[in-house]
């Protein structure tokens, strides 16, 4: 083996090593951002413990009952009659989370109009969708399990296998969907391998 060849293998391993340590982010659409490790382990466990005390119910979408369970606070959007109504007050257990996300985004806490808690049992999904029209920015916090998150253009003529962006969203991470990622892209989650919880914070359109 010549020096050059040896150097070639060494370079190759060092690239693999660097990629493992610092994985390259996919080319996210404008308006999508991802922050792994947004929550500490203690914060995650604290939220999980509080969520266990909430009453979750199966999610209904136009007569279809999904396999995931939800509890919604603040403003409530009904897909049955496409209307927004004032729901239950946002419990104070979410105060620190709303403050933490608000601080990161320079948004006042009062701007978060809805808190949605979702439980995904093993094998459950969320299908391709854009969020309900009255909402604007979406902040998604993942608890207890990683998932595979996908984005694809909303425009049907641009949808094909190459236009799907698929990437892991880790437990304790935060993702933000706003701007073009909110209006021109759909998102979905493939069947989860472990029970996953998410907390979704939404602002209202101005
Ligand atoms: O669980 C998540 O992170 C996604 C939630 C979502 O897309 C929704 O509730 O519309």
Image: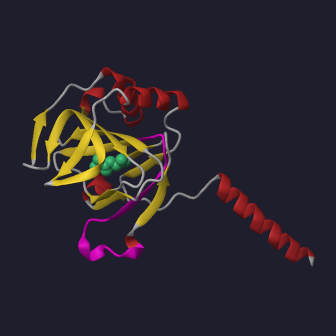
Apparent side of residue 37 relative to residue 47 in the rendered image (left or right): right
**Residue 42 locus on image (x, y percent):** 53, 27
**Quadrant in the picture for residue 54:** top left
Residue 202: name its quadrant.
Answer: top left
> Left or right of 85: which side holds 69?
right
Residue 163 x/y as whole percent: 38, 71
Where the N terminus falls, by quadrant?
bottom right
Please provide the residue range marked out in magenta: 141-162
Q: Quadrant of residue 76?
A: top left
135 or 65, nearer to the observer: 65
Residue that appears at 57% across and 59% down = 24
Q: Residue at x 92, y 78 (%)?
A: 2
Location of residue 54 with respect to 174 vertically, above or below:
above
> From the viewer's perspective, is residue 161 above or below residue 32?
below
- Which quarter of the image is occupied by the C terminus? top left
Camera-side residue of 34 and 45: 45
Q: Is residue 177 visible?
A: no
Is residue 3 a member of the stretch shown in magenta? no
State the residue at coordinates (86%, 77%). 5
**Residue 31, horizontal then vertical, whole percent:** 35, 52
Q: How is the image coloured?
A: secondary structure
- Residue 142 part of the magenta segment: yes
């Amino acid at each position: 083996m010549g020096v050059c060849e040896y150097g070639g293998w060494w370079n190759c391993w060092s690239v693999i090593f660097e990629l493992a340590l610092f994985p390259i982010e996919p080319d996210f659409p404008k308006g999508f951002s991802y922050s792994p490790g947004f929550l500490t382990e203690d914060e995650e466990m604290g939220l999980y413990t509080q969520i266990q005390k909430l009453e979750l119910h199966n999610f209904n979408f136009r007569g279809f009952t999904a396999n995931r369970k939800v509890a919604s606070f603040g403003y409530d959007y009904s897909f049955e009659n496409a209307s927004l109504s004032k729901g239950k007050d946002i419990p104070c257990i979410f105060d620190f989370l709303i403050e933490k996300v608000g601080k990161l985004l320079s948004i006042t806490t009062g701007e978060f109009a809805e808190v949605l808690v979702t439980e995904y049992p093993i094998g459950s999904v969320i299908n391709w969708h854009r969020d309900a029209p009255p909402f604007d920015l979406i902040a998604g916090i993942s608890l207890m399990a990683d998932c595979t998150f996908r984005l694809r253009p909303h425009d049907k003529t641009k949808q094909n296998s190459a236009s799907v962006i698929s990437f892991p969203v880790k437990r304790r991470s935060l993702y933000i969907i706003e701007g073009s990622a909110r209006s021109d892209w759909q998102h979905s989650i493939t069947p989860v391998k472990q029970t996953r919880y998410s907390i979704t914070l939404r602002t209202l359109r101005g």
